[in-house]
Structures are given as C-alpha cells and as structure tokens.
Image: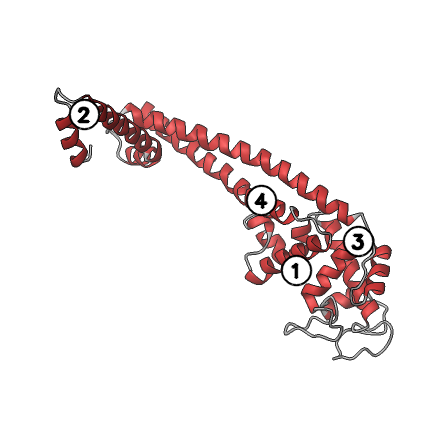
Amino acid sequence: MVPGLQLLSSVVSKKGNPFLRAARVCLLMARGILVCLASFILSPVVLLADLLTPGQTIAKRWVIGYLAIILVVTGVAIAVSHYEEVQTNSAMEVLNSFYQRNIELDQVPFGSEINMVAVRVGLDPALIASVVEVESDFRPEVVSPAGAKGLMQIMPATWRELNPGGPCDGRHPPPAREAGCIFDPLANLDAGARYLKMLLDHYNGDFPLAFAAYNAGMGNVARFQASSVAGIPPFIETRDYVASVLSEWLGRRQEARSPLVMETVRLLRWWDLRLPWVTLGLWLLLLMWVIVKLN
C-alpha cells in the first residue's frame, strides 16, 4: 500500500469515531480495487517475466488477472467485429441508395453532361459531381503536377486504356483539340465515370477503397489493404481525398447522419483488423507459459 494510505489506515483503525471506521473500510476497498486493477493490467508483463525466468513462482492473482484480460479482449474483438458489420451494412445501405438513385442534379457546372454520363454508366450524378469538385473544382483544362488532366483528373496512361481507338492520346496540353479529347468535358467525364465504375465493381461496392484507388492507384491499395484503416493507403492526400469525396457526395444528397456512420465504420474496421492479432498473441503467451510450467 502507498505509505500515506498505510499511515492513514493505521490511524483510523483505532477504536473511536464511526467516521474513522467508515474511512478505514473505504481505504480497504480502494486497496482491493487497486490490487485487482494491477493484477488485470500488469498480468501480461508478469507472465512474460515469469516465462523468461523459469523456476520462479507467481501469485495466483496474476494468472487469474491474465485469464480475465484474455476473456475481455476476446469478447471485445467479437463485439467490435459484429458491430462493425452492422454499421457497415447500415452505411452501405445509405450509399447504395444514392448509388442506384440517379436523381438528376440542378445548378451544377456541366450538369447536363454529368447527368448524361451518370445514366450511361450507372452512377449517381451526385457522386460524379463530387469527384469532379474534389479533383478539379469543375475546371476542364486543369493539369495536376503529376500530369492528371481535365475535370476528373485522368492520367494519360489511364485515358489511353479507356479510349484505345480514340483520336487523342492524352499527352498534349490544353485546350481540347476535338470532341473526343481528354480536355473535352463530356469525353473526360465519360472516361472518368467509366473508370470509377470499374473500380467500384472491382472492390464490390466498397466506396472508400474505390475512391482511394482512384486517387492513389490500385497498386497502392493492394499494398496497404491489409494494414491500413479501411484499406486506405496511409497517405495524407489520399485519406483527405476519400473523406472529401464522401463528404461532398453525402452533402449533396443531404444525409446528415452518413458522415458519422462512415467515420464509425472506418474506426471499427481499424480495430477489427488488429484485435484478433492481440487476442491470438495473448492466447499464445498463455499456452507457452502453461507448457513451461508443466515441464
């Protein structure tokens, strides 16, 4: 016990004022709670130290505390996995309702072209407009430092893959040279929407992953998919991009609760990827400790 608490306990243990006896009971309860918390929190360290120094003995409370922490972490992992699935389904229902809605947009730059492309490709016009706003701020002749061009900021290599027989190779600077040019608003919107639809199909409708791939490339998503939050590469630009597109899209459809739902999903998915490994590590440590003790 802490020296100050021990001195106070010895003082109040003497017969006399009922208040002092009640205080002593409270101190004993506090001591018990501290011991339980220490046994719970520090038990992995104690078992690991005991494993590394065979022949020593530890109190039973450390083993009980370790078993308790395993049960708690395992229960939390199961609960997080279940709740993450529930929240994901809820968020996807909201987004899929937009995905399939195809309500035309009004008072948006290049609105008629966006609505036309959305019907042709099968995307929500608000989604396409959100990508355009984040990518180029509706400027059809903008060129990024990396070389992406037009309203939907398409790289020349991607443009050539999407338009193999087209008159434009996507390499020239602005302005547009013909109707099917990379800087032509309708052609650029059509190519970008087809590419985005391809990514959504590839990632089975996982919008954050599709947006991340649109920004950082499918290779980077595959590289970090198992270790990053919601599979999004750990690039500040990419994470800001995904959040911006989702915010713009959901804002255009005026679904106030959806950003919170998506943020909850991303947080839960981060924990859902890591808690099983923590649980596995705790069980392996216990198994190794039991084997050493039996030997």
Say whether disc 4 or disc 3 marks the residue closer to the N-terminus: 3
Eyeballing the image, is 139 above or below 240? Answer: below
* Res. 91 in view: yes
Task: From the viewer's perspective, tell me whether residue 153 is left or right of residue 230.
Answer: right
First in sequence: mark 1 vs mark 3:
3
Q: Within 10 angstroms of label 2, few (less than 14), some, or many (20 or more) residues?
A: some
Three-letter amino acid code at the position of disc 1:
Gly
Q: Which mark is residue 123?
A: 3
Relative horizontal placement of residue 183, taking residue 63 as reference (left or right): right
Q: What numbered label is drawn on residue 20?
A: 2
> Which residue is depicted at the point 54% across and 40% down?
272
Which of discs 2 and 4 lies nearer the camera? The answer is 2
Amino acid of disc 2: Leu
Front one among 4 and 274: 4
Residue 12 coordinates in the image, percent (x, y): 15, 26
Numbered tag placed on residue 264 in the rendering: 4
Asked which secondary structure carries label 1, the reply is: loop
Looking at the picture, which amino acid does disc 3 mark? Leu
Residue closest to the eye, 183 or 283 = 183
